[in-house]
Image (cartoon, rainbow, N blue to C red):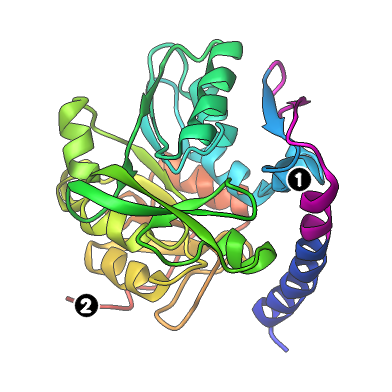
């Protein structure tokens, strides 16, 4: 069995245990909030006990640690960055600290209750360099249906399909609302931002976000950290390869090939691979310092 297969098997076992705990917790816990120390000294997050089990159940320091390491390595003071799917600010508060006073963060969150906690967490941590964008991100601007999972209310996605959280811990119900949709290209134009880094975690809609980012992918050439666990993961890998990006699996530290289906990736423009930022990222995730030539053409 390969290292990746072992990791995937262990992840599946862990996932089943976490889902069982989450189902039980959401039946008995009140919808009150608590404040937790974040992974960065002096930063804390207010979380809802019922909605945000994933944050408090193991402590914030153990939430997606490989992603945190990769993003920390990717950021420089003064950067302009995007947090697409900001939720309650787990990454937005960290990004605000890491880019510094001279940097800027656009935090994109369409769901109303998450956005309320996001705003509270940004305010309580003095994140004056963060702008909240009240919209979803898609392949084209407009107004669209947006599904919020009934089990937690903590996650949502464009369309009427079930969210990952609803599939994992719910009963197959969603709340459908309407939301404004922007593309990453249009958002960056409106806010006059040239991003050096983008984090995307939007419940399987990552491919839609990247389809609406042609201009910035080809001109700004940002480093991208993205979840790929939902539908569209293969298409994301194909699109980024066509745009001359190389990708690494954040859990296995291996370069991503066309048949791979990683949970989270970091994507680095090919022409930046030997630069300082790329070296810092690969060192942080334990990846090899060199990689083979691009595996997809055209």
Q: Residue at x 22, y 34 (%)?
A: 188
Instruction: Tell me the SS state at disc 2.
Output: loop
Picture quarter with the N terminus: bottom right
Picture quarter with the C terminus: bottom left
Q: Residue at x 38, y 13 (%)?
A: 102
| Left or right placement of residue 31 versus residue 214 in this view | right
**Comparing labels 1 and 2, the label whose residue is closer to the camera:** 1
Q: Which residue is mark 1?
A: 62
Quarter of image, res 166? bottom right
| Left or right placement of residue 126 versus residue 23 in this view | left
The span picked out in magenta is: 21-42
Work out whether 60 lies above or below 129.
Answer: below
Q: Which residue is mark 2?
A: 297
Residue 161 position in % (x across, y down):
43, 67
Residue 73 position in % (x across, y down):
54, 39
Instruction: Tell me the SS state at disc 1.
Output: helix
User: Is residue 215 or residue 166 the one in the foreground?
Assistant: 166
Residue 279 position in % (x across, y down):
48, 47
Q: Dot 1: few (<14), some (14–19), or many (≥20) neighbours within 10 Å?
A: some
Quarter of image, res 3? bottom right
Residue 85 position in % (x across, y down):
45, 43
Q: Residue at x 82, y 46 (%)?
A: 58
Q: Earlier in the sequence, mark 1 or mark 2?
A: 1
User: Is residue 145 or residue 70 the one in the foreground?
Assistant: 145
Are the residues flagged by discs 1 and 2 in contact, CB closer than 8 Å?
no
User: Is residue 177 or residue 111 the one in the foreground?
Assistant: 177
Is residue 231 at all visible to an observer of this figure? yes
């Amino acid at each position: 069995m390969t290292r990746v297969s072992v990791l995937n098997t262990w992840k599946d076992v862990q996932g089943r245990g976490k889902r069982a705990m989450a189902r039980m917790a959401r039946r008995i816990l009140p919808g009150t909030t608590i404040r937790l120390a974040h992974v960065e000294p002096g930063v804390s997050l207010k979380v809802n006990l019922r909605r945000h089990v994933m944050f408090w159940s193991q402590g914030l320091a153990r939430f997606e640690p490989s992603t945190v390491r990769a993003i920390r390595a990717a950021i420089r003071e003064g950067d302009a960055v995007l947090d697409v799917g900001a939720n309650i600010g787990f990454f937005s508060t960290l990004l605000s600290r890491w880019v510094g006073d001279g940097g800027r963060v656009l935090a994109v969150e369409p769901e109303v209750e998450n956005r309320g906690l996001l705003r509270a967490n940004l305010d309580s941590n003095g994140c004056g360099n963060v702008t909240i964008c009240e919209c979803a991100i898609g392949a084209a601007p407009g107004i669209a249906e947006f599904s919020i999972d009934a089990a937690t209310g903590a996650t949502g996605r464009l369309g009427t399909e079930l969210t990952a959280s609803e599939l994992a811990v719910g009963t197959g119900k969603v709340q459908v609302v309407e939301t404004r949709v922007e593309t990453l290209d249009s958002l960056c134009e409106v806010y006059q931002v040239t991003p050096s880094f983008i984090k995307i975690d939007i419940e399987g809609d990552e491919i839609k976000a990247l389809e609406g980012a042609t201009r910035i992918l080809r001109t700004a050439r940002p480093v991208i950290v993205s979840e790929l666990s939902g539908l569209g993961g293969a298409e994301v890998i194909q699109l980024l390869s066509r745009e001359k990006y190389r990708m690494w699996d954040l859990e296995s530290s291996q370069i991503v090939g066309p048949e791979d289906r990683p949970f989270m990736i970091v994507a680095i423009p090919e022409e930046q691979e030997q630069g300082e930022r790329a070296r810092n990222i690969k060192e942080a995730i334990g990846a090899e310092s060199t990689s083979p030539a691009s595996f997809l053409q055209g």
